Image: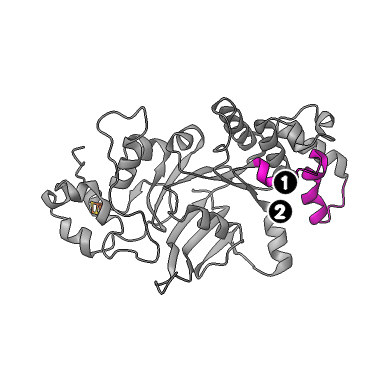
Amino acid sequence: MTTPPLLSAQGLHVAFPGRQGAGPARAVDGVELDIRPGEIVALVGESGCGKSTLARALLGLVKPTAGRITHDGRPLDYSGRALRAYRRRVQLVLQDPSGSLNPRHTVYDAVAEGLRIHGHAGDERAAVADALSRAGLRPPERFFLRYPHELSGGQRQRVVIAGALVLEPKLLVADEPVASLDASVRGEILALLLRLRTELGLAALVVTHDLGLAWNIADRVAVMYLGRIVETGTVEEVLTSPRHPYTQALLSVLPEAPGTPQILTGEPPDPSRIPSGCRFHARCPALASGEAERAGVAEACRTTDPGILTPGTEAQSACHLSRTGAQPAY
Ligand code: SF4
């Protein structure tokens, strides 16, 4: 039997008013996503694809225009008290630790802040020490009175993670968690997230533009394009046998990728002008190369939405061509 999801997005839409007379910007446009206890899901896509808006919606920071989010099987309640309780369980870890930490707060105060906001009744000092230890800052007391500028980038990110852990969450939403760090410490922070999953059963949604990072940390990958998840599956399925031309193009430009890089052409995605048919069709290498024509799906590519992927563990691709079983010849 499949484990019920810890967090689930069902038919989720988030739209913002469009600029200069344009229609609404459909930043999230029909997303179905499950995250199970202890599972690490990487949400990948280009900048502007809607992945950060989706993450903010999952955190309850943005209210969906339509659809719903469920946590432990119950719909997310947006009333103040319920939302506060939810945010204990689902914690955000931001990309830039320098921006997340107040330079005038000591490490102790930074980590204790969440406990104070949530009116923690237990032993604050013990909880802060435990969170710092779990985040790999040992002995924790040595860090209590330090200020962010006295720490390395990796140590600052560990303080941010400790600030999340102190509330004993079940899930971390990590937005580009290592993007601002040196290559030498990236591996350490990723190893920490994996260790927390093993030790605490902590699930994570890792939002990233970096498919290499997804490979190193995720169990499952969801690839997002223009507000929608267009491919999903296990990390092996998606990254070693990608079926959607968008995923194939993203993978082809990695330094270690074999073959010719597929540089995506065309305008960057504009969520207030989502094309009809397949939303990727104006930039799709398989359509441009004639592959879709030869497989008999080119007309469908231009006119018929390949649809919304359903949550589940099996590999799926929102692409007419991949459903024919044809493999693009590039
Ligand atoms: Fe390309 Fe057609 Fe697949 Fe869209 S549906 S990704 S246009 S082949």
Query: Which secondary structure lies at badge 1?
Result: loop
Between the C-alphas of marks 2 and 1, the distance is 7 Å
Mark 2 element type = helix
On the image, the x and y values in percent for residue 188 come to 60, 28
Residue assigned mark 2: 88
Q: Is residue 79 magenta?
A: no
Instruction: Tell me residue 234's x, y (percent).
Output: 42, 40
Residue drawn at point x = 28 percent, y = 63 percent: 305
**Viewer-closest of 287 and 324:** 287
Which residue lies most toward the front here? 20
Q: Quadrant of residue 142?
A: top right
Q: Quadrant of residue 151?
A: top right
Tell me whether circle 2 and circle 1 mark residues in contact (CB < 8 Å): yes
Residue neighbourhood size for the residue with mark 2, other residues' Cα within 10 Å, grouped as few (<14), some (14–19), many (≥20) = many
What residue appears at the point 28 percent right and 52 percent down from the top-left corner?
266
Figure check: 150 above or below 81 = above
Q: Is mark 1 within 8 Å of ligand 1?
A: no
Q: Which mark is residue 71?
A: none
Give the magenta part as a residue range: 97-122
Q: Residue furthest bottom?
A: 21
Kindly identify which residue carries mark 1. Answer: 168
